[in-house]
Image (tube, helix red, strand yellow):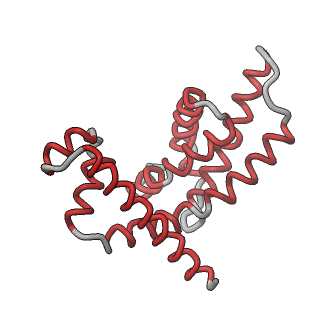
Amino acid sequence: MIVTEEFILDLIKCQGRLYSYVLSLTGNKNDTNDILQDTNKFILEKAADYTTGTSFAAWASKIAYYKVLAYQRDAARESLLFNIDILQEISDKSLSKITDYDSRLGSLFHCMEQLSEDHQKLLKQRYEEEMSLEEIASLWGRTYNGITSLLYRLRLALVDCVEKSLQLEDGV
């Protein structure tokens, strides 16, 4: 099967979820990066096995789970890591959290849109462009403490907005 553009886009979209999931199972960023790379390679090799219209993220997560098991098995030859039952329990809990990922992300984007353009720009500079607080303070003509305080208030407002949005979704 030729890998379609839609398949690649689905793979790209679920990278954050897969990373979080694998990290929750391994607890180690280096191991997670290795496993995720192996998972992505395997997903591309097995593209023909994916059934279009089903949950790509669930399919990819199952592959990641088996890649973690294989990694743990290989690592166990060197030292004892996790009992497979414990790993399954961690997996189940992580998957339940990851299913909330899309809802939370959607709510966050919605809440971001409600902020003023200046506040959106500030958050983008800090978190997307990874500008330092000193750079931002200088650029905005404000003090370091002023920018720190404003970012803190914006983060609190976003957390509150996301929580309220999720409660509305759940009908609470």
Q: Nearer the viewer, residue 155 or 142?
A: 142
Q: Residue at x 60, y 66 (%)?
A: 54
Give coordinates of residue 148: x percent, y percent. Answer: 33, 49
Residue 169 appears left or right of 145: right
Residue 130 appears left or right of 46: left
Give coordinates of residue 24: x percent, y percent. Answer: 65, 42
Residue 155 appears left or right of 136: right
Q: Residue furthest top?
A: 78
Q: Nearer the viewer, residue 28 or 22?
A: 28
Question: Which quadrant does the C terminus fall into?
Answer: bottom right
How many numbered marks, from 0 up? 0
Residue 25 position (above or below residue 146): above
Residue 43 appears left or right of 27: left
Give coordinates of residue 146: x percent, y percent. Answer: 27, 51
Q: Nearer the viewer, residue 101 or 38?
A: 101
Q: Residue at x 21, y 67 (%)?
A: 117
Residue 115: quadrant of the picture: bottom left
Q: Nearer the viewer, residue 132 or 107?
A: 132
Residue 2 position (above or below residue 167): above
Residue 144: quadrant of the picture: top left
Q: Residue at x 47, y 51 (%)?
A: 11
Q: Residue at x 52, y 64 (%)?
A: 102
Give coordinates of residue 122: x percent, y percent. Answer: 25, 55
Residue 117 position (above or below residue 139): below
